[in-house]
Amino acid sequence: MRLDRFDLNLLVVLDALLEERNVTKASHRLHIGQSAASGALARLRDYFGDELLVPVGRRLMLTPLAESLVQPVRDALLSARAAIARKPDFDPATVERRFLISASDYVTTVLMAEVVRRVAELAPGIVIDIRSPLQDVFDIFERGNIDLLVLPEQYMARFTNTKVKLFEDTQACVVWTENTQVGESLTFDAYMDMGHVTINLGDERSLAFEEWFLPSYGKQRRIELSVDNFSILPLVVVGTQRIATLHRKQAAYFSRLFPLRMVETPFDMPPVVEVMSWPKHLENDPAHQWLRQIITSCAQP
């Protein structure tokens, strides 16, 4: 099919070439032969009167025109996919849909678990796929491969996509119920003398607490152990004299399930604000709107 003399089938190939910057990788992604991908690139070069991808050393680089096409081409394909997926009448009880949500295990514990229960009751045909944010989550999100992204507010500043605040949370400490070093309250000096368990998420977000704590108090905690997700934390605190500082909602949750008790932090810390964002092309999608409403209602105190 052609639009203004342009073969629309080439739009999908162009998107893959602009993203992969490699003919072989683009052909694998599109499940076509390399010769077919090369032929499509030749037709695209002819249409635009531009090389689009040029060899620089062992790599292919985008020309200025190709760079200018990346976002418009991506937006056009995302809008097309949204239009194809949209149903004229949306009925939660009968709809069949899969949503990919990127959220930490903290958010999954204190919010998404209830969301999943409610969705299962009201819309049994909807499948929810929750994954922890990867290091390249922002690139994946901007390519339209994530339906909903939930992260602390400070990490969402780069996005112009629609965002909505879900909830705030403060910090608390947890210790083993048999911990002999901590009473009903905790002084700052006692806090600093203890061995700490911390969360290391594997990218810049893992340093958020430490980067805030050191400039604020001029000293660093004695970290004895780090884990890569919140759910492991109670298992490495129980039976020890260690202490962990984490979000209050999850601290309360762990204290109900494990022999842990909560203790107030001996310092003030700004609350964490969890924000939900989604791709622009899904803004008016009825099923997506419905899911967002479920999430925001579950987030209410």
Image: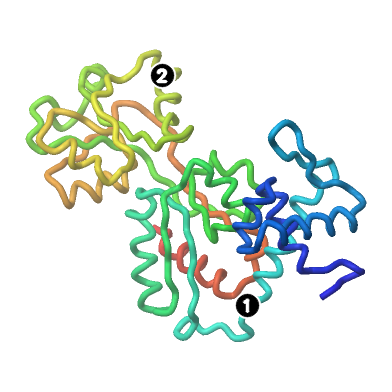
Observer able to see residue 263 = yes
Residue 92: % across, % down: 48, 81
> Helix, strand or loop at disc 2?
helix
Q: Is residue 152 above or below residue 91?
A: above
Q: Which mark is residue 86?
A: 1
Residue 204: % across, % down: 48, 32
> Helix, strand or loop at disc 1?
loop
View extreme (front): residue: 35
Distance from Cα at disc 1 to Cα at disc 2: 50 Å
Residue 159: % across, % down: 64, 46
Q: Nearer the viewer, mark 1 or mark 2?
A: 1
Ranked by sequence position, the earlier of labels 1 and 2 is: 1
Left or right position of 81 against 102: right
Question: What amino acid is found at the position of numbered circle 1 in the picture?
Answer: Arg
Question: What amino acid is found at the position of numbered circle 2 in the picture?
Answer: Leu
Q: State the residue at coordinates (40%, 31%).
A: 269
Observer able to see residue 74 = no
Q: Is residue 240 above or below residue 89?
A: above
Q: Which mark is residue 214?
A: 2
- Location of the N terminus by quadrant is bottom right
Residue 132: % across, % down: 41, 50
Q: Nearer the viewer, residue 243 or 42?
A: 42
Label total for image: 2
